[in-house]
Amino acid sequence: MGVIKKHLTITKIAWQRALTYRFTVLAHRLGELGEMLVLILMWAAIYSGGGVIKGYSYREMITYILLGNLINVVVRNWLSSVVSRDIADGTLSQFLVKPMPYLRYILFREVGRISVAFAFSVVSSLLVIFFFTRYFIINTAPLMLAALAAIILLAFVTELLLSFLVGLIAFWTTEVDGIYATIDRLKKFFAGGYFPISLLPPVFVKASFLLPFGYSFFVPVQLYLGKIGIETAALGILIQLFWLALLYGIIQLVWNRGIKKYEGVGI
Amino acid sequence: MRKYFRVWLQLSKCAIGSYLSNRLDAVTYLIGKLVRFAFFFLFLWTIFNYTDRLASYGRYEALFFFLTFNLIDVFAQAFLRGSYMLKIDIRTGWFDHAIAKPVNTLFWSLARLTDILDILFLLPIIGLLVYVGMKLPIMITLANIVLYLLLLATGLVIVVALHIITIALTVLVFESENFIWLYRESMTIGRLPPEIYSVGIRFVFTYLMPIIIIIAYPVKALLGRLTAIGFLTALIFMLVFFFGALAFWRISLKHYSSASS
């Protein structure tokens, strides 16, 4: 019980700190919503003559954008910048002597840190979905929802590990912001965040299923829209579990190598 | 004027030095910008595999809107990057030094940092603008090009005015740095032809936050779709915004409290 309380305290402190920057979060969120609305209006203009585009009806496309963005804001985090800052300014040193692994500490802290942005994002996304209820497809098949929840949960953990791994680059160079920005954009593309990957040649869809990025946007929405079945979703979950194990292994390897290079500059 | 150009040149040299000392960061940032640009370009290109028109515009016309948006947006980021630094300057007390310098404080606040990467990024954008411009399905006359450039300049003056307003707000209300991000996010409205938006949205982004005047009017002028009233509206907005922003900046400076010094 005490262990759980200890971990939740870390999350709570990070949550309270994050509340300080609520206007910043709100401003960014408004911008994101604006971008999403622009996409919806663009598709509305394209579908104005009716019809189906690459298997997507207008309602399916609107649902793709709305639900995909909702899932994306649920699973995302900004852990890489925190990890790299801790390494670059020597803050990491204090964690090395604490009776808790840095990875575990930082994961719990990140959950608290992103919770304000998470709350703003989920509420605002739900409001937008409510606004577009007429076009939003409702699917309440219990098995599908269970698989969807599993995919989202695994995507959340995968994203955390992926961000942590990217943050570890700071062991070798402090010039990491550009690398993160590039990786983020590549991730967004393969996740189907710019547009449904299925509009591109089939090789991109395959890549999206095999890479971990598609599970934070494209794959769960495909499942929700009934474009993939439960069997494919189950295979997807296995792929996610494979990535989780692989990422954890790589993190251990990179951490052990990185910590030998770490000089604690900035303490 | 010459003095200010020399000051700007010196500041830009310092910026180049800074980028050269962080080469990896600079290169990867540039790659990141190019990747995002390429993906959206690909997105727009792909859409026209499934439709002929986007709100009455063809592929190359829609791409011209997107490229003009990038030209103006990146131009502002390249030359007005200083406005992003003002909050730090005020917090650390450095803004007091800026006021005491023998250069105009507004010039210093806007132009103290030149983003060399964005200047480099302008090159492929301009190249693509010329390429896509040549593919447009209409006969482009010299008058169209002159009008396009004139309205582009008008739009850039309004963009400068919007940056002045945001830094004036930062001086007045310290926690207002997010206005610059609201402006940046609003600009994305201009990526696509304005006709895809409803009348209400078009009204807001023409007359309240004039993104459509800044980006869409030059393109419409090039395509021969802008009326004389539209041209006059752009000129009036430029004058109102620019002089209004200058007046607002002077007011904000008078209220600067130097709290951090």
Image: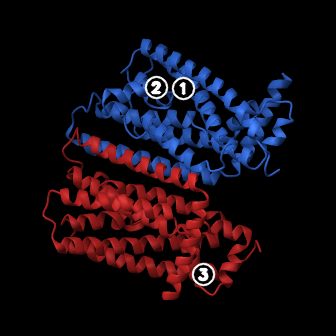
Chain colours: A blue, B red
Q: Quadrant of residue A155?
A: top right
Badge 2 marks a residue whose secondary structure is helix
| Name of the residue lying farthest toward the left | B139
Looking at numbered disc 1 in the image, what kind of residue is underneath it? Ile
Chain letter of the residue carrying label 1: A
**Residues packed near mark 1 inside 10 Å, few (<14), some (14 to 19) or many (20 plus):** many
Looking at numbered disc 2 in the image, what kind of residue is underneath it? Pro
Q: Which residue is at the front of the view, A13 or B17?
A: B17
Badge 3 marks a residue whose secondary structure is helix
Chain letter of the residue carrying label 3: B
* Location of residue A4 in the rendering, given as x and y in whole percent from the top left corner: 80, 25
Mark 1–mark 2 CB contact (< 8 Å): yes
Q: Is residue A133 visible?
A: no
**Residues packed near mark 2 inside 10 Å, few (<14), some (14 to 19) or many (20 plus):** many
- B249 vs A170, left or right, is left
The residue at 24%/56% (across/down) is B132
- The disc at residue A152 is 1
* Location of residue A132 in the rendering, given as x and y in whole percent from the top left corner: 40, 39
Q: Which residue is at the front of the view, B71 or B175?
A: B71
**Residues packed near mark 3 inside 10 Å, few (<14), some (14 to 19) or many (20 plus):** some
